[in-house]
């Protein structure tokens, strides 16, 4: 793990060492009169709030006229919060530039791929490379930092908000060219990387290179891929430019910005080195039965980005959001579980958007810690109770989580394998990641989400469900991993180079020889899919050959694999693949390959086979396997019931309820959507 | 009711006093040679046509070259029609400016929210605020009026057509600013109204304010809402400008324009004061089983806009339209019923688009009174028969309808509650209006559709199914209504101020104290909805507590209500709302509240409960309740069979068939989709 | 048949006389180093490849800098191919202009109907009327032809690729006006043709006429229709301009371009006179059960365009494509059948896109004759086997196919009847064509696809399933056909003139009097459709009156027909059409009319009735009717099993397997998706 991510953990751990777990949310005092501020501070105290994020959208309040500054209101707010014992995560308000900028400098507004220059009147109306925007953003950051670097309330800096705006304007085209020149040295490099010999797309001068704007037919995949990288880097530059101003002003607090989980325009693996604290916004959908596992996966990503140390849940909702088409509220139990799940997976706090419900604006129907109806409400009672729960869990602050299993994922693979022009548009690497993660989550394994270029030593099991593009470095790392770990590959993995070009046969690139097999064809499957038959005799005795071994149903996608020595674990029937291998093990190496997408039961058998091969025991739990969702952090075992009916089970060993102090033994009931945190007496 | 709407009724009544019910349609002589005109006039006479709308699309014929005028053809047409005893509704042809205007003055063409300036070659290609367009429209209106003010054929003026064009251009931006300055006085007012403190959207100068064009994320709801108001007003200005020219030329005939029912860009409640005759275009879809109730609701809206007096069905189709994806023809019975339903709900005539089917153009496959195949056709025979029917109903001309029940609806509520960013996008106020209207329609009640700012005295029952935004005046009116009527509120009602901002708790605003309850949360429901259980003991004896009381299923949306003294009529089970109140009655006032969307059976029980509370007897009918759709106008009872099978029932009292003169007694059969008009011998 | 199409057949026949059937594909040496070229040539030889298409996307390689030329690589490639015995179809590389053109001359890039100027970075980024583009395209064609006119490898010229790009720019507007002036003489003609009296769309000057760009509402149908014609003609001009340069350079080889079957922006009937060889790109979807019949229909269109003589399958896929959302591979049997089906329907060769799979670019996941995984693959083994099969079928080269049945179809009808604003959007003429074709295909009839203006003498049966627009010439031809053939009309046929205007009653235009009936109304049907009842007594004895006569179900669309002497073959029940005629026969002429869309069983009975009336015996087959898909070319009978299970049947007469030489007698099994080619011993 890189030193910077280790430092990230430390920065947050230093914050929580004094305060325990962080609790609070976004706070927008600029929407309310000062009398309301005092009411808010008192209610925050009563709810156990110890950190609020301020000024995310304060730019037009601070600078209502270009070049002017009004910090008086913010002085008052910070002083009041400090007096009330509430620390501040102070934001540079650059996610929403003032209307004067959009009007006076139209080039600061972003342009779509169709050439439409978008307008202000919402938020995010900035071109990430516009020099006027960047300059004014640096200035406001500098002035803010100069004024509050020493303010005792400020414990964390929050640069911008949910970086993700994309732009296809002429200015971005120019910056894109510069970025490409940096990456490839010259135009020949670009032509080579993008394979512009195809369809006669050769570039003869830099001026010819443009972002992947609207074209008559399929765009060059390399252009599209590099434009993703470029955009992520351009956004990162906004962050680092503003951070530099904060540091230049002498501020010594840690600096962060809030990720949006698996967001497709920002590659967080290239950002974490620049973040003192890894923080994330997480909005699991109460209407989605998959929300718990999706949230857990994303939390594990964040903890992995933080090098295994603590990260911070910067935004979540205490109940309904308002930006989906239909927004279910959260039950009080679900609100509590969603918060505790983040803690269980390594977060050192729970912050919500937002403290007080806005009366006006596009998010007035988003739930808030203090609802429109006030403090005497179901939601706010839940907010207070959660505050108390988090205080009970203060000892967990700073506690890292160590995983023996690595799930590999990277943004370039995701970008490439969700472009147009593939064998299928239905094999989303993120969904494949989730499919492989789900059995591990059900079993309660700790899992890191890392890339193929990460340091994989120390993992017993390394899984690459959908690593479509691989760098040479990643291929080398993967090959090395076979020597120290069990490595398993999913379909359509190790296919392409970092530009999306298909690597020379045999595939999987760099591993086919070890595997003793190569991929001959990619075979999207018809609606009937294909059947899998376990090959008892050929796989090692016991696991996969046992009744209910690697059988079941393949859907969506399969590979035609050509055997060159590998052991066949399962074969296909149907889809013109009768008898072809579906799952393989290398003859002499800890390398496995699954050549299809499978349903959950088959995936569970596959993961069991792999954990078995890696000699990974299932986590020792006081409850029967599968009864509850579990996660362990330090000496705390979190037990979640993600279902909508209560679950009653019998504890195999006793413990203490970390929230109530009660002894836990014998029969345990976890309410629907509820959670229990158990200190195990081991 | 306002004087102007009373006048509106009178203007139309004066027209029909002499002529009986109006019958005819749009007539486009400019598409045909003069020989055809004479054939048309003869066929019109034979069909009983007494009014045609002329010149809706005649601009390029009158002014083929900018500034020239050719009225000769129109002189001839009007003379011929007059000679034939056919009156004329003469249109200002401003819905489709000539191609020279679109070409020479591109700024007259409308621009989309994405910045695309639309083209001519269709119709409606005008920006509603473009000064050149407005000027030329006034000029053509003036010249037309000067020439025909005294023409004996002309009995009505028809300004433009189906006003509804929207534009986001720079010119509209400038006009929008002026409109806002008028509404709010200054920019501070705008900032306050729109809550621009949210997301840092503060406007520091007028130049920064733009229409709600394409933005990176959710637009400010206040901006979007005011742009709707502005557009409706800009369209109204087009109407009043052209009307002013007509009046200035000395024309004394009444002036109208044709609404499009519940059209989302024009608020007719702000228009009716300017209309001498309320007229509407109504195109119920033969493929929609809900078409009859939707049509009846829209007709009731129009009658209400006319203050209870007669209105005019300005356009309808005798059979299929051509602008849906799949256009079913109407059976002859349905054509007759669709026309008679309008009469039953207060129309003083039936006009169709259009008289003669066009050979060319985008509407050549729209049905017409005279089809492509000529007069010896099913459709034209039906047209002649309908003409005879309307002559039989001449005594109804001018007859008003008085309703004891008011259903409240307003465009700002509809606009606000169909924006993005709400608890759910599935609770359309118009659909809620329809849900509450349906049981009343089934029972044959006369219902007015009015706003919360209307004069509600005189109504026994006032229903507010979905009045999301309420002005202070409306709150005051509603509160007063509780003293004189029974008032019932639906979910998500009295939530917001006129800018869409959430009003301070407790909600429903201005009424929660009377109700003895407040809304604590909005709870969109999952696919299972929630169950309702009638609370027998707590509601007044008899109705809701009886078997089949207020039970059933809530779907889509519920409210979490906090009791503060109200009587619970029904409670929820499910959706985390077990035991929470679903329907309430104020402890000491005639105020009811239904906190969810319900299915038809439950809605019927709810409406029964309310009519009962208002001591409203069901209409006395000679047929069993529910057997037929009914509507009464004067001493005529209209009986419709909206189903696709004949209905036979037994009359409880005899009457006379108003169309055939036959005695009606004993068994009565109404054919599928058919109608009977009965003069009751009472 | 026109002389030019006869010549077309001859040009291709001359090519194949020497070589046998053509086999090969697109070859992109510019994507590979020269060492790979030699490997390719050897593998091509081994696979039996005898023709490759080169240079389709070579422009930026030949002219990397404007005005320069680099032919050295192409010299080497052509020499190598020639040495290897592989002929070349040499393309003008104008489908993908170099990036310098798009950048230096932005007006060469196409503009959408919304005004977005599209970008390079894909392909097809040209405006078909841009003068700079056309000039540079002519220059590159001229230089290419000058260099290779005498090259012994070059046997065919391939102008551009898949012409189909559309543009709405100002330059196209100007060209459109010129085109209209040519067609209509003056603006009055345009106004008349488009019926601009409707909606006041009169054009007073040429500058007012624009392409059918985005409008507020439905566009003028005549404008839209003529813009289709104009675009097809503009594309044709690109072809003829480049061909002229080829001829001017002295090249004498035949010239072609590749059609895309039923592509909506190019009317091939107006092109074939300019093509020496008719060639087509055909990509049946393995996931579509209708793919075989759709492919057969398209092949028959191509053969008809070639006047019954051979045509060339210029592109197909040996397995999966990559541009659908989900791309199933082809089984080896399907790959073989898809290729042989083209031969069976008159192709003189099978060329695939492409020879070697591209490593980079938007089509890297498109299957290729030489896959990424190399020669030792399922796909490449199939490619070699197919090469051998084609060699066995060499005697078929040049063999024409004569059909006794003509199915009428034309692009203007298709364009008009798929516009907006019709009775229904669900009656696509192409789908109706397919519905009428399917029973003929099942029975193994040879069918020509021609227009209503084709020479119809010589056909025993002429079917017009969906000839919505008809020219006066076509009406005359159709009327004449009744004298010499059996003519049958489908619904919504002979309705409109070439501008889409409804022709004067009675309809079907020009034929109603012969038919003894006219269409009174068009009646889109509800979801229940209508039932058909055969009228035994009234139709001629035997066929339609027999059990299972013309009964069944009408869906989507029906006509209300008024009898004026015709014999009723079937009547409707339901949809307000009880007792109305559904199918008619003229009283004294060989004219039939089906007034609805029907399901396959009813359509089969209808076609049986018609072939019977035309005294057309079903093809004499050695297998039971319906057991296999069949097609006969010369003395070869192709037997296809389009299903996914093997079919075993018993031969009624013996033959020889044309591919294996084996005797075929008794029981014959055709594998799933497989094919057998039988030389009949007759």
Image: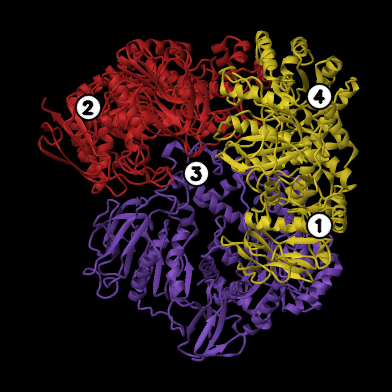
Chain colours: A red, B purple, C yellow
Mark seen at residue C157: 4
Q: Which label sits in the foreground, 2 or 4?
A: 4
Chain hosting mark 3: B
Distance from Cα at disc 1 to Cα at disc 3:
78 Å
Mark 2 sits on what residue? A632
| Horizontal side, residue A97 vs residue C375: left or right | left
Question: How far across and down, in percent of the image, does residue C438 sit?
Answer: 68, 48
Secondary structure state at the residue bearing disc 2: strand
Question: How far across and down, in percent of the image, does residue A48 sit?
Answer: 21, 35
Crowd class of label 3 (few under 14; some 14 to 19; many from 20; radius 10 Å): some
Is residue A228 at least partly visible in the picture?
Answer: yes
Distance from Cα at disc 3 to Cα at disc 4:
69 Å
Q: Quadrant of residue B673?
A: bottom right
Mark seen at residue B187: 3
Chain hosting mark 4: C
Q: Which label sits in the foreground, 1 or 3?
A: 1
Image height of A263 relative to A359, above or below = above
Question: How far across and down, in percent of the image, does residue C411 sit?
Answer: 76, 46
Q: Are marks 1 and 2 in contact (CB under 8 Å)?
A: no
Q: Are marks 3 and 2 in contact (CB under 8 Å)?
A: no
Q: Are marks 3 and 2 on the same chain?
A: no
The mark that comes first in sequence, 4 or 1, is: 4
Distance from Cα at disc 3 to Cα at disc 2:
55 Å
Give the residue drawn at x 69%, y 48%.
C443
| Horizontal side, residue A424 vs residue A384: left or right | right
Image height of A450 relative to B429, above or below = above
Q: Are marks 4 and 1 on the same chain?
A: yes
Mark 1 sits on what residue? C486
Q: Are marks 2 and 4 on the same chain?
A: no
């Amino acid at each position: 793990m890189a030193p910077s991510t280790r430092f990230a953990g430390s920065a947050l751990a230093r914050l929580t060492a004094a305060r325990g777990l962080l609790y609070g949310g976004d706070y927008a005092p600029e929407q309310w009169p000062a009398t309301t501020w005092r009411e808010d501070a008192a209610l925050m105290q009563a709810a156990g709030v110890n950190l609020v994020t301020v000024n995310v959208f304060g730019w037009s309040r601070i600078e209502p006229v270009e070049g002017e500054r009004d910090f008086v209101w913010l002085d008052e707010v910070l002083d009041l919060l400090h007096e009330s014992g509430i620390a501040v995560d102070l934001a540079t308000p650059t996610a929403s530039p003032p209307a004067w900028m959009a009007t006076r400098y139209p080039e600061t507004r972003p342009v779509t791929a169709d050439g439409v220059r978008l307008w202000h009147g919402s938020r995010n109306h900035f071109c990430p490379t516009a020099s006027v925007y960047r300059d004014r953003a640096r200035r406001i950051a500098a002035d803010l930092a100069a004024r509050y670097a020493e303010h005792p309330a400020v414990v964390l800096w929050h640069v911008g908000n949910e970086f993700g705006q994309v732009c296809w304007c002429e200015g971005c085209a120019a910056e894109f060219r510069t970025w490409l020149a940096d990456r490839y040295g010259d135009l020949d490099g670009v032509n080579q990387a993008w394979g512009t010999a195809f369809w006669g797309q050769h570039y003869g001068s830099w001026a010819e290179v443009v972002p992947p704007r609207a074209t008559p037919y399929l765009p060059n995949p390399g252009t599209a891929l590099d434009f993703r990288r470029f955009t992520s880097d351009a956004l990162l530059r906004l962050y680092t430019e503003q951070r530099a101003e904060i540091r230049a002003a002498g501020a010594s607090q840690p600096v962060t910005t809030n990720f949006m989980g698996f967001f497709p325009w920002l590659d967080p693996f290239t950002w974490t080195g620049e973040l003192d604290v890894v923080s994330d916004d997480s909005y699991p959908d109460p209407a989605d039965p998959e929300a718990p596992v999706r949230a857990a996966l994303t939390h594990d990503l964040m903890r992995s980005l933080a090098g295994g140390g603590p990260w911070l849940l910067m935004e979540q909702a205490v109940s309904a959001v308002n930006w989906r088409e239909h927004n279910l509220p959260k039950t009080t139990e679900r609100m509590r579980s969603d918060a505790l799940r983040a803690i269980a997976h390594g977060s050192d706090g729970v912050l919500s958007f937002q403290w007080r419900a806005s009366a006006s604006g596009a998010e007035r129907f988003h739930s808030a810690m203090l609802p429109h109806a006030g403090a005497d409400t179901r939601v706010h009672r839940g907010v207070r109770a959660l505050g108390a729960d988090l205080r009970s869990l203060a000892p967990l602050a700073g506690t890292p989580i160590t995983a023996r299993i690595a799930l590999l994922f990277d943004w370039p693979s995701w970008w490439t394998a969700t472009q147009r022009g593939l064998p299928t548009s239905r094999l989303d690497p993120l969904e494949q990641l989730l499919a492989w993660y789900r059995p591990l989550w059900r079993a309660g394994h700790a899992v890191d989400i890392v890339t193929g270029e990460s340091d994989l030593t120390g993992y017993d099991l390394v899984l690459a469900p959908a690593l479509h593009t691989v760098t040479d470095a990643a291929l080398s790392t993967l090959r090395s991993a076979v020597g120290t770990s069990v490595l398993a590959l999913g379909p359509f993995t190790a296919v392409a180079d970092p530009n999306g070009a298909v690597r020379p046969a045999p595939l999987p690139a760099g591993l086919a020889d070890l595997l003793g097999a190569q991929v001959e064809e990619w075979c999207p499957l018809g609606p009937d899919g294909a059947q899998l038959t376990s090959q008892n005799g050929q796989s090692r005795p016991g696991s996969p050959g046992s009744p209910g071994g690697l059988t079941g149903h393949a859907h969506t996608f399969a590979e035609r694999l050509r055997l060159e020595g590998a052991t066949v674990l399962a074969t296909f029937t149907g889809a013109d693949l009768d008898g072809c291998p579906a799952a393989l093990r290398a003859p002499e190496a800890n390398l496995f390959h699954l050549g299809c997408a499978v349903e959950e039961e088959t995936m569970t058998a596959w993961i069991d086979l792999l954990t078995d091969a890696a000699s990974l025991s299932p986590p020792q739990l006081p409850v029967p396997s599968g009864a509850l969702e579990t996660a362990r952090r330090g000496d705390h075992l979190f037990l979640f019931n993600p279902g909508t009916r209560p679950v009653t089970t019998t504890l195999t060993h006793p413990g203490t309820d970390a929230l109530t102090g009660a002894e836990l033994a014998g029969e345990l009931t976890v309410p629907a959507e509820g959670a229990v945190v158990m200190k195990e007496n081991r």
